[in-house]
């Protein structure tokens, strides 16, 4: 099993300390068979993660840069987008671990920590905080995008160690850096073809360790512990290519196909991990619907050549989704999303009030080697100031 993510200093420290994982490491941790990623847009995840043939957002640089060609004319600004994601297991685990570490007696404290690790044995706990402030501009045939990625996540899993000692596996990362993208639109008799490309200059710090219950207790009062000693760091330049073809924009179904090659040649951060190259296919339709502003139906198949080494499961690579915009006015808009991601349902809602947008999404990340083995249900809360 090959893991390929990462995390960065202050962000890692904040997340890990907040997670109550102020520990002494023993070995490299493996929390699951989930796929590595750089950024998850909540609106895309609400639609089951399907976006290769959809686009229209600044975040299209992470799924298919050709999607920048579907930005609205003029400027599209995401000034302050913040997404907080968590799993129910992580929330309950952190509450219980905090209570255990508040015990003054060291022996009782150790027993309480062991009890917490036993109670959550085999369960994955996930917390993440992501942001991608960006400015996109689209003219008649050209679109460009400039943004800055900040993505921090921690995954935790308790399991049985040697003897009766419990172990806590921690996989944390922070990735950050500027992202640039562009798209060019070319019309012909067969429709409209849009070509896109993006480049990412990223730094990554990663914490991937296993911690014993005794280590957790010992480090609570260890003022000399430096989290940076447990981190691996690296930097990378990543390239993405994409194409989208609209067969007939005036057709009542508006069929579109898309192809993207993400992390061309792999995006390697050295010891901190690697994001493998993936080739992804997508198709979308935008049929006319009465009484509503817009309906989008989409389907993707990601990692066509099975470069994700975690597994070769078909359903983990399938993305299906629908987005229904109930209305869009000058000062307000409302959209609902639903889909199927890695074989698990997704649902999302997005409300815009002037320059403020609020969103909620639930989806499940498959932590097992095949769909349905070990789903981790997650919830995303999104806020953005933009126009």
Image (cartoon, rainbow, N blue to C red):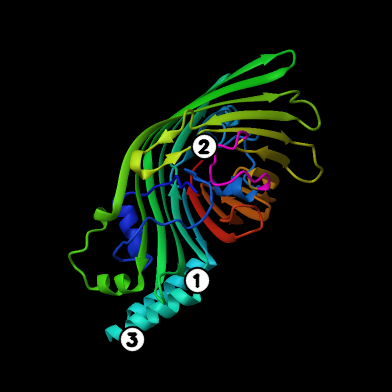
Residue 210's place in the image compared with 305, above or below, is below
Q: Is residue 314 magenta?
A: yes
Label 1 element class: loop
Name the mark on residue 384: none
| Residue depth check, mark 3 versus mark 2: number of the one nearer the observer | 3
Q: Answer whether residue 99 is visible to the viewer in this image.
A: no
Q: CA distance from mark 3 to mark 2?
A: 48 Å
Q: Which mark is residue 121?
A: 1
Q: Is residue 268 above or below residue 314?
A: above
Q: Main secondary structure of the magenta part?
A: loop
Residue bearing the label numbered 2: 62
Q: Secondary structure at mark 3?
A: helix
Whether 87 is among the magenta residues is no
- Is 147 placed above or below 81 here? above
Q: Residue at x 57, y 60 (%)?
A: 376
> Which residue is at 37% across, 75% downward?
98
Residue with the mark numbered 3? 108
The span picked out in magenta is: 304-315
């Amino acid at each position: 099993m090959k893991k390929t993510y990462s995390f960065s200093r202050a962000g890692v420290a904040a997340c890990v300390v907040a997670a109550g994982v102020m520990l002494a490491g023993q070995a490299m941790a493996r929390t699951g068979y989930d796929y590595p990623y750089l950024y998850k847009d909540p609106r895309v995840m609400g639609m089951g993660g399907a976006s290769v043939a959809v686009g229209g957002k600044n975040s299209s640089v992470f799924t298919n840069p050709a999607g920048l060609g579907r930005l609205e004319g003029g400027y599209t600004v995401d000034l302050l987008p913040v997404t907080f994601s968590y799993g129910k297991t992580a929330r309950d685990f952190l509450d219980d671990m905090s209570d255990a570490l508040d015990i003054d007696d060291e022996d009782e404290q150790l027993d309480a920590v062991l009890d917490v690790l036993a109670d959550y044995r085999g369960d994955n706990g996930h917390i993440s905080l992501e942001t991608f402030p960006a400015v996109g501009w689209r003219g008649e045939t050209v679109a460009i995008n400039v943004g800055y990625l900040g993505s921090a996540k921690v995954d935790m899993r308790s399991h049985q160690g040697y003897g009766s000692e419990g172990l806590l596996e921690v996989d944390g990362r922070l990735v950050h850096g500027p992202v640039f993208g562009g798209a060019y639109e070319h019309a012909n008799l067969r429709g409209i073809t849009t070509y896109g490309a993006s480049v990412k200059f990223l730094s990554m710090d990663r914490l991937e360790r296993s911690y014993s219950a005794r280590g957790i207790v010992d480090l609570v009062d260890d003022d000399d512990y430096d989290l940076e000693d447990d981190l691996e760091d690296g930097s990378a330049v990543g390239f993405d290519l994409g194409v989208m073809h609209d067969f007939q924009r005036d057709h009542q179904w508006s069929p579109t196909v898309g192809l993207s090659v993400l992390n061309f040649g792999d995006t390697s951060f050295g010891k901190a991990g690697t994001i493998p190259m993936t080739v992804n296919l997508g198709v979308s339709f935008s049929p006319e619907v009465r009484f509503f502003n817009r309906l989008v139906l989409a389907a993707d198949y990601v990692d066509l050549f099975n470069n994700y080494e975690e597994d070769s499961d078909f359903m983990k690579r399938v993305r299906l989704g629908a987005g229904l915009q109930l209305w869009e006015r000058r000062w307000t808009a409302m959209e609902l999303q639903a889909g199927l991601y890695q074989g698990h349902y997704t649902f999302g809602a997005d409300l815009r009030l002037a320059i403020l947008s609020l969103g909620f999404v639930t989806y499940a990340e498959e932590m097992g080697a095949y769909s349905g083995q070990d789903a981790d249900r997650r919830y995303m809360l999104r806020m953005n100031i933009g126009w």
